[in-house]
Image: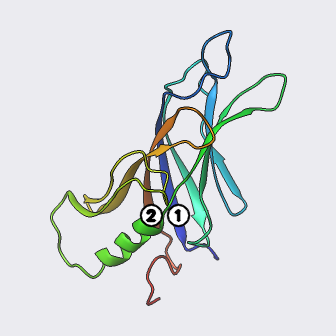
């Protein structure tokens, strides 16, 4: 298998998404996450600018440097769906924390392995922590959508090793 592993992306909710339908004063949003030649998407939620998807999407990661893009769309019936903003999911700090974890030994549950601040090099809307909890390493992030007046999406990422694959182990 040529995948390094799986990236579970839980798409929790959208916050103050733009209004695309002026008649209803809302939008019909769904999220598409893409990398390499893969695309996964959430279900459509009608007439909602603060949707709660709470959906888990999974990407096969073949290249840790390939960009991962999150795009929110407004579903249209008689024309092409309207983009409602995009954000990049930067997994590099997360990958570094997972690799570092293997060399740290026992750590208490709930410890933050790394804290990230919003900057010009990421699409974070606020501080994001990479947490060790119940043996899993997760990162929740609130992403500020670009190319749009308003809107954020709350997600969580988690790496899943595939048995027999290199994974994130640099010594494999």
Task: Identify whether 66 is placed above or below 9.
Answer: below
Disc 2 + disc 1, Cβ < 8 Å: yes
Q: Which quadrant of the figure contains the N terminus?
A: bottom right
Q: Residue furthest right?
A: 78
Task: Identify whether 128 is placed above or below 150.
Answer: below
Secondary structure of the residue carrying tag 1 is strand
- Observer-nearest of 156 and 25: 25
**Callout 1: few (<14), some (14-19), or many (20+) C-alpha neighbours within 10 Å?**
some
Measured from the top left, where is residue 130 in percent x and y?
32, 59
Q: Residue furthest bottom?
A: 171
- Observer-nearest of 159 and 82: 82
User: Circle 1 is placed at which residue position?
Assistant: 6
Measure the C-alpha gap from mark 2 to mark 1.
6 Å
Question: Which quadrant of the structure image shows residue 43?
Answer: top right
Q: Residue furthest top?
A: 23
Q: Give the residue displayed 49% in from the left and 25% down from the top.
A: 50
The answer to whether residue 126 is left or right of residue 2 is left
Q: Residue furthest front?
A: 120
Q: Give the residue displayed 61% in from the left and 36% down from the top.
A: 148
Residue 159 bears which disc, if any?
Answer: 2
Measured from the top left, where is residue 42 in percent x and y?
59, 38
- Observer-nearest of 118 and 50: 118
Give the mark nearest the N terminus, 2 or 1: 1
Measured from the top left, where is residue 162 in percent x and y?
50, 71
Task: Identify whether 135 is placed above or below 155.
Answer: below
Secondary structure of the residue carrying tag 2 is strand
Colour scheme in use: rainbow
**Callout 2: few (<14), some (14-19), or many (20+) C-alpha neighbours within 10 Å?**
many
Task: Identify whether 63 is placed above or below 147.
Answer: below
Q: Give the residue displayed 47% in from the left and 88% down from the top.
A: 172
The answer to whether residue 108 is left or right of residue 87 is left
């Amino acid at each position: 298998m040529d995948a390094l592993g799986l990236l579970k992306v839980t798409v929790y909710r959208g916050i103050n998404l733009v209004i695309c339908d002026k008649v209803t004063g809302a939008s019909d949003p769904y999220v598409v996450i893409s990398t390499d030649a893969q695309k996964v998407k959430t279900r459509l939620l009608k007439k909602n600018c603060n949707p709660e998807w709470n959906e888990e999407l999974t990407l096969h990661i073949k290249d840790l440097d390939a960009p991962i893009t999150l795009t929110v769309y407004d579903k249209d019936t008689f024309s092409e769906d309207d983009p409602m903003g995009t954000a990049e999911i930067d997994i590099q700090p997360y990958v570094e924390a997972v690799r570092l974890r293997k060399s740290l030994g026992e750590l208490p549950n709930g410890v933050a392995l790394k804290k990230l601040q919003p900057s010009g090099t990421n699409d974070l809307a606020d501080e994001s922590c990479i947490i060790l909890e119940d043996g899993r390493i997760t990162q929740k992030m609130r992403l500020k959508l670009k190319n749009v007046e308003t809107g954020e999406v709350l997600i969580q990422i988690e790496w899943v090793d595939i048995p027999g694959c290199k994974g994130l182990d640099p010594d494999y």
